[in-house]
Image (cartoon, helix red, strand yellow):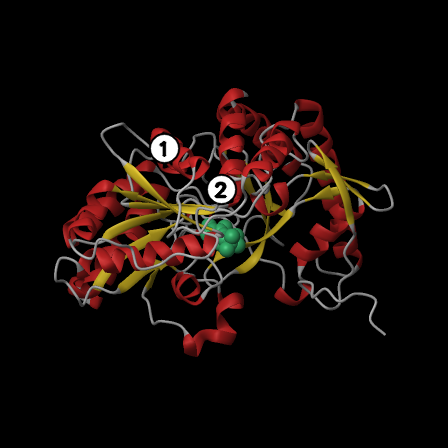
Amino acid sequence: MNDSWLIKPSFDDVYPVAAYGEGVFIYDEHGNKYLDGSSGAVTASIGHAVPEIVEAVTEQARKISFVYRSQFTSQPAEKLAEKLNDLAFEADDPYYSFFVNSGSEANETALKIAVQYWQEQGMYRKHKIISRWTSYHGITMGALSMSGHTERRKRFAPMLEDYPGISPPYCYRRPAQESCSDYEMKCADELDAAIRRTGAEQVAAFIAEPIIGAAGGVIVPSAEYYKRIKEICDHHQVLFIADEVMTGIGRTGKMFAMEHYGVKPDILTLGKGMSAGYAPIAAALIHDRILEPIRKGSKAIIGGHTYSANPQSSAVALAVLTFIEKHQLVDRSAKNGEYLVNQLRNMALTTPIVGDVRGKGLLIGIEFVSHLFTKTPFPKQLNLTRLLVEKARDKGLLIYPASAGIEGGDGDAIIVSPPLTINKQEMDTLVKLLQDSIHEVQRDLMLKGYM
Ligand code: PMP
C-alpha cells in the first residue's frame, strides 16, 4: 500500500511536509520551525511568503497567466527583459533576454546559441564546449555534457557529448610549493592547451560558473584568473558563457558575480534567484554582438519552450527584482556576507574538521577534512556531508549539501546561503545551530574511530 504517490529525490528518505514559510523560516505540518540557511537550493533569496510578491502573483493571474510566445508577447516579459538589460553591465553593452524555465534549460540554450552564432558566420565545425572538471551546469543532456560532476554523469556517460574539461582554480588544494596566483594562472592556461588540442576551429565556447557552487563547495577565483580566461577565449575566437544560475541576482554581493571580475561574458545565464523561488523562470542574456549575425542570418533562435516568457512567471520575476532594488538587497548581501563569513570562520576555530570557509556575499562554502594539515577528506562511504545536513535539519537548520572541489565531485562541503533579507540575530542563530551540529557529528566520528 502506498502512502505517497509522489516520487521524491530518494526512495529511502523521509521528508518533512512543508506547511508554510515566513521570512527566513519554513514551518512543517507539525509546526516544527526551520531556519532556511540555504534558501532551499540557493534560490529563495528574498525569503518566504513576501506580501509584495503574493500581490504580484494574484494581480497578474487576474489579468492573464499564459500566452504562447509565437502568438503574443506580454508587458511583464517585455519589462523583465528591459530591466535585466538595465542591470547587466554598462549601457553600451546591450544584453537581450531569452526566457526559459530552469537553469539547465538556460545553459542548454546558451550552448545552442553559441553554436548557432558560429554557424551563421559559416563556421560549421565550431560545436564543442569546454568547461571545468569541477562544475555543475544542469541535468539535461547538453548541460550535463558540460558538467564535471561524476556522480550525476556516470550513469549517462555513454550518451553525453565528449566535451573537454579543464582544472578548477581550486587554491585550497594547490600544490604546497605554489602560490595561489601562480596556480590559478596554470589552471587558466589549461584552457589555452585544451583549445589547441581540440582545434580552435571545433570549439564554440567555454562555460564557467563565476564562483563554483555545488560541485566545488564555493570556489572563488581571482579577477586575474578571469582576465586570463577571457584573453584566451578572445585569442581563439571562443565565446565565454558565464553560468550565473547560482551566483546571479545579488547572491554574491553584486547583481552579477562577473562584476567582481570586470569581465563581461558573451552570454550569461540566470535561474534560481531570478524569481527567488516564486515561479519557475530562467534566462539566457545574450550580448547584442552575438545576436547580430543571427539577426542577419536565420532571423530566429532555434529553441524555446511552451512556457518560455509566460506573463505569469515574468511578472513574478519582475516583482522580485523590484523588491531587491527597493530594499537594497544586493548591498545587504555584501554586508551580511562579510559578517556571516567572519562568524563562520570564528566557529571553524572550535572544530578540527572544518578545513576551509570561503565565499563572496551570501554564498559561503565550508569544506570538511579529517586532518587539517594534510587536508585529507573523510572516507566517501561515511557520507559526512549527509550526516551534517541531517543533523542540522534535526536541529531546525537547513543547509545545502555540496561536494568539495576535488575533481569529479568528491570530498565533503556544505553551502550556507540564507535569504539576502536575513538579519543579524538570525545569522547568529544560524551559526550557533551549525556549530552545535558540527560538534555533535564530530563527537560521533570520534566515537566511531574516524578521528
Ligand atoms: N547551473 C548552476 C551553476 C546550478 O547551480 C544549477 C542548479 N544547482 C543549474 C545550473 C541547474 O539549474 P536547474 O536545477 O534549475 O535546472
| Image-based side of 105 in relation to 226, left or right | right
Image quadrant where residue 438 sits: top right
Q: Amino acid at mark 1?
A: Glu
Query: Which label sits on residue 311?
Result: 2
Res 323 quadrant in image: top right
Q: In the displayed orientation, state which residue is furthest to the left.
A: 122
Residue 160: x and y in percent read 40, 72
Q: Which mark is residue 297?
A: none
415 left or right, relative to 137: right
Which residue corresponds to the image point at 58% horizontal and 25% vertical from the top-left? 339
How many numbered dots are placed on residues in this image? 2
Is 255 on the left-hand or right-hand side of 416? left
Give amino acid for label 2: Pro
Residue named by callout 1? 82
Q: Earlier in the sequence, mark 1 or mark 2?
A: 1
Helix or strand or loop: what does disc 1 sit on?
helix
